[in-house]
Amino acid sequence: MIRKISKSNISEQVLQQIKDNIINNVWKRGEKIPSETELAESFGVSRNTVRAGIQCLSAIGMLKVVHGKGSMVADSIYDENFFNSIPSIELNETEWIELLNFRAIVEGALVKQAAINRNESELEELKRCAEEIIETCKNKNFDVCALADLRFHTCVAKASRNKTYYYLFTKMRDIWLSQQTMSKIIFDDYFDLHRQIYEAILNRDPESAHKYTVAHLKYRLDEEKQRLNIKT
Amino acid sequence: MKNEHILLELKNSISSGKWKPGDKIPSETELAVTFAVSRNTMRGLIQRLIAMGALIVVRGEGTFVNDKNVYDYILNSFIPIIALEDNEMIDMMEFRKYVVIEYTQLVALNHDENDLANMFECLMLMRKHMNDLQEYVTAYYNLHVCIAAATKNILIREMIVKMKDFFYAEASRSFDFLNLNDEVEGYEKYFAAIIRRDYIIAQQCIRVLVEKNIANIKEKVNQIDGSNFNRMQKL
């Protein structure tokens, strides 16, 4: 399972081997992996190098370091840490438009599932958010509005009952928030769309939920394009 | 300052453009002094940013802001790099099902001659390799990459590219139950509908195909262990 390490690119090789043992289920979920000292010896590298590799993997949630006990393989891929929220980054115009289109495809597909699978408490949350969006926008309180908007769509993701989507969406949360322009132009229709999405989900109407979600994201796209035009 | 705050500060230096892609960041020692923490603490924080793909280390030169493809970066840790359990595999396949049905409309509307040629080649290879699972799966995976590329959305294509291991794992768990001939015929029908730009029929074809694979895996899971699904209920 453990091969000697050649001199070039040592830390990367150590990292890769640890990863491989996890991916290939040699070290199983929830189980303890060998200690730093043992690994350092088997790899023939310093303890510091091994520690760096372990820190890397614990940062992305593959390993869990328990103080005084050692490192365990993550229990579940749905651990909070597993999909570590990526740092927000500056996207250029094309990238941002590409990303919104991507979101329209994925969210358009999954909102249909939300309309089918939603429960009562999710309906309440969606209603609350939709009202908050309308309210805060009237008062031009755009920052709060952006947060309510994010909560609305996070709730949709949860209601879809698809964990892969839920984690994809929450992982991108920083991006959605940092790029939330909510430019100071008020589109009446835009705010109405959240109410319409909510009603479609309430009525278990996947097709309308899809229609309004895509329309909502197209608004965001148009808004973004308009903002870019103003800038240039 | 708490570590999480320092991490946020470091992240902000990247997102605000203070440190630009490709830039070398200050040394561990300098940063440790700036934030008044030990070098070890600072090293740990930097390592976390490296693990997230925000920074990269060039040996002997220092630590730099990663300037690789931004899409790569966004999707990088979305696809789990760990051995998937059956229930997680099913959740992922269902995700893929909903999304591929959705973007099939774009495939039908946006594809060009090149996309068609690529898809056709993959289909031929699938037919040719029905007796060789490894070759078959490679062609099957490539077909899905070509389909995703035809949407003309880079992120959709990248997402499928990154799911490579997942496709192979899916195949190894579901294909022994499959009649590959039916599957190839199914994809040929899908392809024909795409050529005609008939997305309604194409969506029906792809739904049937993916659902068949999901059913195969579910059947296998039920045979082995019926209780496994309980874990899925908790979100």
Image: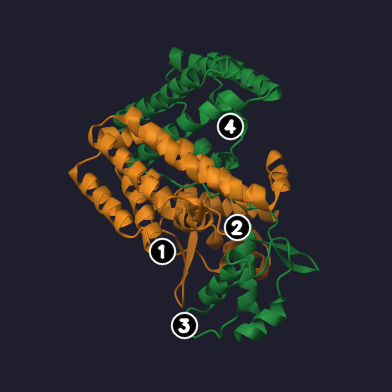
Residue reaching furthest right?
A68
Kindly identify which numbered label has been placed on residue B233: none
Density class for disc 2 (Cα within 10 Å; few <14, some 14-19, many ≥20) is: many
Is B202 placed above or below A82 here? above
The hue of chain A in the figure is green
The Cα atoms of the two marked residues, 2 and 1, are separated by 31 Å
Q: Which residue is mark 2?
A: A60
The answer to whether residue A206 is above or below residue B8 is above
* CB-based contact (under 8 Å), mark 2 and mark 1: no
Q: Quadrant of the C terminus of chain B?
A: top right
Q: Colour of chain B?
A: orange
* Secondary structure found at label 2: loop
Residue type highlighted by circle 2: Ile
Are the residues flagged by discs 1 and 4 from a single subunit? Answer: no
B199 to B177, vertically: above or below: above
Residue at 57% across, 20% down: A201
Quick one: A49 or A76, which is closer to the camera?
Answer: A76
Q: Which of the image's four quarters has the N terminus of chain B?
A: bottom right
Q: Nearer the viewer, mark 2 or mark 4?
A: 4
Q: Are marks 2 and 1 on the same chain?
A: no
Element type at mark 4: loop
Among the two numbered marks 3 and 4 on one chain, the one whose residue lies closer to the N terminus: 3
The residue shown at (55%, 61%) is: B51
Hey, what amino acid is under mark 3? Ser
* C-beta proximity under 8 Å, tags 3 and 4: no
Tag on residue A160? 4
Decide: marks 1, 3 in contact (CB < 8 A)?
no
Q: Which mark is residue B134?
A: 1
Residue A8 marker: 3
Q: Quadrant of residue A121?
A: top right
Host chain of mark 3: A
On the same chain, marks 1 and 3? The answer is no
